[in-house]
Amino acid sequence: MNRNHLPSWINRLIDLIADAPMSPLGRLAARRLGRPAPRGSVGTTSFDERPIRLLIAPVNYSGQAYAWARALETADADISARNMAIEVPGGFDFAADLLVPVGTYHNDADWQQRQLEAASRATHVLIEAEEPPFGRLLGRSVAAQAQALLDRGVDVAYLAHGTDARLPSRHMREHPISYYDDPAVYLPRAEQVAARNIELLRNSGRTVFVSTPDLLSDLPGAFWCPVTVDPARWAADDRRERPVGAPLRVAHAPSVAAYKGTPLIMPVLERLQAEGLIELDLIQGVPSADMPARFAAADVMLDQFRTGSYGVAACEAMAAGCIVIGEVFDRVRADIFTATGLRLPVFEAVPGTLEDVLRRLVAAPDLSRERARSVEFVSAVHDGRHSARVLQQHWVSGQNREEGLHASGS
């Protein structure tokens, strides 16, 4: 549903229901999300008996919460880390320690209370994307649920993932082709939600992390906790260099075409493919299990062209030895270098310069050095070790929690 096509009164009604979840209309809307599973049939989070017990909840975007939990346990034997995620029908199948059916999460007061009690046995809880970890408990208020944990002696922190705290008005001022300017985006609601979430985070007095470094512009007191991938899963050990004169194998995986900038770059790709210079693999609707093989068969992966940053897909492609091309803001590259001492090996391009970049790569006799840089960067920054250090140094250890640092050193 494109809300830009709806009458203004309908949009106001939709927002009113979303902002008043405990109202009669809000309760009715929640019931439409599904009936809860039979009472008591959905479990709650449990921890190993270790000094530090840490929960990450409730969204697990791209499997990141599960990956961070495993990284923390690998880094420190004193940590038992778990994640909880809402199971959305038809969504991507990512590993999680606890998957909760969406109907139970929203509409089972018994599970919500039991999960709060389970989370109260944690020493630390990391709330993702400013979403309430206990469904509609306490009026579905993130702040109230966080306070309930704090009152029980739990150390609460927050982690912003992307659109939840990326302010559209700022992004559009700084970026002429911001994806927020796309007709597919309902801008008024995006601005309202991001502004509200930013206010929550700034006023919380808690440690805040971001998973993509561009969010430091909206949350300058936050710390960058890099997204995590498994290099071994994505490694293309049998990769073969492209024969001289052969087309450049180019992959593009537009999970959301408007956000990635797909319509802006397709004319260039179609033109180069017609010339026989590239072979385009447009990856859509492909199960996660099949993605390593698709990236292993590509020389180049085209990432995002309307955001100014990079994310999980770019890291997966780099781990496979692809050369990644995308648009990354200069300040994002600078923050990455400050945090890691490494240069981000994403080739810079906007839709207007993409053709030149691709033609240079087509003409390059050997791309092995650039491939190696990509693999080395992911192994150093995105295999979980750096993320675990950031979470430990700025939160779990209880030290260095002052604001004003953008990211931790290596």
Image (spheres, helix red, strand yellow):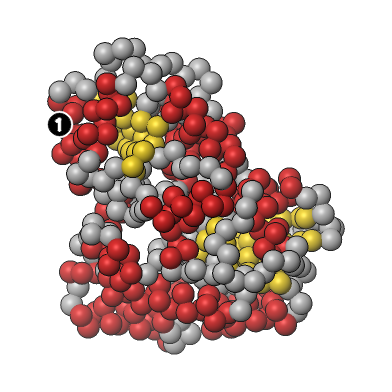
- Using the image as rendered, state which of residue 367 and residue 238 is in the foreground: 367
Work out whether residue 364 or residue 66 is closer to the camera in this orientation and state it: 364
Residue at 18 percent across and 36 percent down: it is 268
Give how far across and how far down residue 155 sits, in percent: 71, 72
Camera sees residue 385 = yes
Q: Residue 97: image x %, image y %?
A: 65, 53
Q: Does 71 sit above or below residue 29?
A: above
Can you give x and y, in whole percent of width and height, for residue 311 in the image? Answer: 45, 48
- Give the percent coordinates (x, y) of residue 356: 22, 34
Report which quarter residue 7 is drawn in: bottom left
Residue type indicated by callout 1: Arg
The quarter of the rendered structure image containing the N terminus is: bottom left
For residue 134, side relative to residue 124 (left or right): left
Front position in the image: 35 or 230: 230
Q: Which residue is mark 1?
A: 271
Residue drawn where x is 29% and y is 53% of the image: 306
Q: Quadrant of residue 248?
A: top left
Q: Residue at x 15, y 23 (%)?
A: 275
